Amino acid sequence: MNLKARKILVMRYRFIGDTVLTVPFIRNLRRAYPDAHIDLMLEPFSGQVLEGCPYVDRIIPFEFKTIHKYSTSSQRGRLAGYVHYRNY
């Protein structure tokens, strides 16, 4: 099966260690789809670890707490959080 992906979004939730361990996966993804645009959506503090990663076209900061169903102190609220990220 020959799949041609043009856009790929990788979501990584929170933890920095898990984010670092995602790099080999992203490297292999880039090798498999060299022409695809690869975005990585993750928590802002984890994103700093991967700044300059050659396998990713764009890092999208994703504040999971703004849309998590258990979050009560969100400045945006759940619906506004979803709408905000929809524009990416």
Image (cartoon, helix red, strand yellow):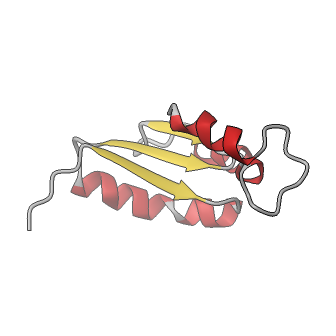
Which residue extends farthest top? 87
Q: Is residue 72 left or right of residue 11?
A: right
Indicate the position of residue 32 as horizontal and vertical percent values: 23, 57
Residue drawn at 68 percent across, 44 percent down: 79
Above or below, comparing residue 13 to residue 79 in the picture = below
Residue lying farthest to the left in this orientation: 1
Q: How many numbered callouts?
A: 0
Residue 26's x, y, as percent? 41, 56
* Front residue of this view, candidates 73 and 62: 73
Query: What's the residue at 8%, 68% (across, down)?
Result: 1
Report the front residue among 40 and 82.
82
Q: Residue at x 16, y 51 (%)?
A: 4
Instruction: Please tell me whether residue 37 is drawn above or below residue 68 in the rendered image.
Output: above
Query: In the orientation shown, which residue stands out farthest toward the right?
Result: 73
Q: Nearer the viewer, residue 45 or 8?
A: 8
Horizontal and vertical percent for residue 38? Answer: 38, 44
Q: Residue at image x 41%, y 64%?
A: 25
Left/right placement of residue 26 relative to residue 33 reads right
Q: Position of residue 43 (x, y in %)?
A: 68, 49
Q: Name the image quarter holding residue 14.
A: bottom right
